[in-house]
Image (cartoon, coloured by chain):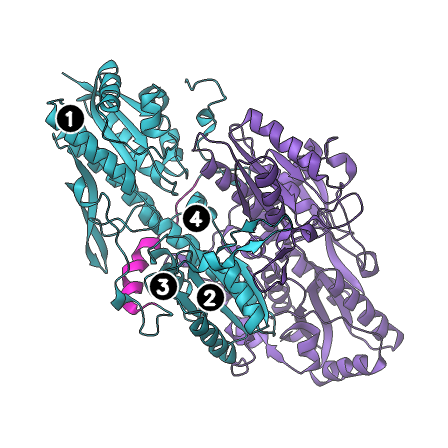
Chain colours: A purple, B cyan
Amino acid sequence: MSKNMIIGQSGGPTAVINSSLAGAIEYAFSSDKIDTVYGMINGIQGLLEDNIIDLTKRFKGKPYDINRLRLTPAMFLGSCRYKLGDDEETFAEIIDVFNKYNIGYFLYIGGNDSMDTVDKLAKYTLSHNIDIKIVGVPKTIDNDLVGIDHSPGFGSAAKYIALAVKNVAYDTSIYSIKSVHIIEAMGRNAGWLTAASALARDGDSVAPHLIYLPEIPFSVDKFVDDVKNKLNEYNSVIVVVSEGIKDENGNYISARGDNVDKFGHVMLSGTGAYLKSVVEERIGCKVRALEPSVLQRSAGHTASMTDITEAYNLGVIAVKAALDGKTGVFSTLRRISDLPYTVDYYTEQVSVVANNEKLVPRSWINEQGNDVTQEMIDYLSPLVKGVPQVPYRDGLPDYIGLSHLDIKKQKYSD
Amino acid sequence: MSKNMIIGQSGGPTAVINSSLAGAIEYAFSSDKIDTVYGMINGIQGLLEDNIIDLTKRFKGKPYDINRLRLTPAMFLGSCRYKLGDDEETFAEIIDVFNKYNIGYFLYIGGNDSMDTVDKLAKYTLSHNIDIKIVGVPKTIDNDLVGIDHSPGFGSAAKYIALAVKNVAYDTSIYSIKSVHIIEAMGRNAGWLTAASALARDGDSVAPHLIYLPEIPFSVDKFVDDVKNKLNEYNSVIVVVSEGIKDENGNYISARGDNVDKFGHVMLSGTGAYLKSVVEERIGCKVRALEPSVLQRSAGHTASMTDITEAYNLGVIAVKAALDGKTGVFSTLRRISDLPYTVDYYTEQVSVVANNEKLVPRSWINEQGNDVTQEMIDYLSPLVKGVPQVPYRDGLPDYIGLSHLDIKKQKYSD
């Protein structure tokens, strides 16, 4: 007897979460164990509000739209920051919705918190003898998930940072005056994304000249010395810093940048903006701070093809696992070899990944704490490769529309 | 008797100035009137310092390298901000270098100030009966040059802004909470680049919701009302503002954003950052300010193919004009038709363009002053079209190297 599948997305966006969605639904459409594929709008929160769309109706037999979905950044199904608690009532509500839609398979694409949701739901259904398979699909640009060689979404964000640093390095190299550019990368407490800026280097261009990860306590004095040394060697010095760098006492450097506006309010200015003021103050050359912010996680048009493909495959693997009767697992990958780059896919207990954090090992950062080692480069290199054939219309990517996510609008229907 | 050609680049970088250089040298290589093509490193300043490289040696018979040059952002020859004065001594020095290198043709790729240099040099050589043809090639991301339908470099920057707005719009649409994103575009006193954000709209996505150009006096109260109205209609509101917007008294809005850091120093925070504080203060929803800064003029990997081709052709036309005996002119283009999009190329007296500024006409801005009209869209649409086949290596664009520009390094040689 066939059942229906429901799938959702949660947490912060990446360039390839929709690729996992495309992989999952395309595989589900091909299985005779699954009748209809539903999507929760805005994750678990949408499920609880019965805000559900029919993905079979929307996408089955529409390969061009599935391809656009695969190459569209952000989340077709919307997101939520809903943290599932332990109260019996909420679980009962969820099960009610499952029964209403005859759900046999529950797929959830997300990061750390989302995997915690998968874990809790799987434990609840198992302990209550409810036959629904609960499977997670990982994602995060921060690459801080354990139990996976690298997270889907990370490769595309890494590529964005490397591209931005390369373009800025070219832009700033044209003047014969001394200048410093400070680029602030995301990644929270993990330095992976900041480290990826090293991929901007090639046989000719040596930028970035300095890289500071949050895994090493940051010293402003050391930073000033480092920059001065590099300015002795180069006209234009490019520095990449993580948003999450902290001083020896564990205080965020960004917190020092608190400025007061004309109304007397404290304005958080970010790590890069603070270090810009330090360079102005203590070195005095031309300096600019750049904060790509959400651009680094949303640049679908320059995503990594490796990342897109892996995200798609992890969606497929998750549905396969559910159909094989697995629950409380997430789809993951391990690296078989760097060159040629090969991975294999499998599933792992979701309890491994939930509420853990993978940081950069000390040995992948240079001794002085201002650059990464060759081991890091070897790890990162394959992840940014490949240029996707994004369909363009009128000079811009022909992404699939997301206007159905606006709750002010009429409920989405085909 | 054949002569040599010298070419230089000047002013701020764009994604396609090297395409003009590629067009000029490739055409020059094909002419038997030109022996050797030289390049000035860092424009007129480099010429005066005899910092000159042999481009024939570097590029002739190397089509793959010329293609990389065509698709590399920034300036292969470096830039300067040197403003040519009226003193006889400097002119005499320049003519000395011309004689030393047997120069018959002088090409200068740049914006307003560079065209002024072309104008002055041409007048000087003409009045002194020195037989050197002086020709300009236009460029600027601001699109504020007169005497040309649109400036090379503008289309690629316009595309960057439209891409960024589209990606941010997707990124922010996934949450069911109210938010405002303010994106600050370059363009100095002209609103062309800000207007180009309108190209992010498609059948589904309506962002940007509000667009403010510097041609219309900016009212903070009106802005707050506009944003509130849009928030009644949409969850996520995207606003694009020009860096150059001014209030009714002609004062830059960015100047209001002066904040005081912990040392008591005034910190210029930019237009977007100031308006972010206004939204926080007077509306109170989630708000983010994004300033793509130099990323919008340096993104070679997502340049407009139309722009790359036109920049290349304007380089060719300039050399052709010089060989035809023209001097004191610049290469330009006029639009023949929007659909199909066609242009033709010609030359114009450089005095037309020097020290003038082309602003957005009032009739291309909507009545309320917070959006653009269909006329603007029709003008902009063809300029961002076409995706270049940028060569990639290891997942990143295989740009041609610029490390020879670092004066600390050994002087460039093949």
Q: Chain of mark 2?
A: B
Q: Is residue B159 left or right of residue A265?
A: left
Horizontal side of B32 relative to A284 (left or right) equals: left
x and y percent of residue B134 in the render? 19, 30
Closer to the N terminus: mark 1 or mark 3? 1
Residue occupied by mark 1: B125
User: Do marks 1 and 2 share a subunit?
Assistant: yes
- Are the residues tagged 3 and 2 within 8 Å (C-beta)? no
Residue B195 part of the magenta segment:
no
Q: Which residues are magenta?
A: B372-390
Considering only order in the chain, which callout, 1 or 4, is on the residue closer to the N terminus? 1
Could you tell me how far apart the alpha carbons at marks 1 and 3 are, in whole angstroms?
Answer: 44 Å
Task: Give the labeled residue for mark 2.
Answer: B239
Comparing marks 1 and 2, which lies closer to the viewer?
1
Query: What element does badge 4 sit on?
Result: helix
| Residue picked out by circle 3 | B249
**Chain on which label 1 sits:** B
Q: Position of residue A128 (x, y in %)?
A: 87, 78
Query: Do marks 4 and 1 share a subunit?
Result: yes
In front of the other: A58 or B63: B63
Q: Quadrant of residue A264?
A: bottom right
In front here: A38 or B332? B332
**Dot 3 crowding, Cα within 10 Å, few <14, some 14–19, many 20+:** few
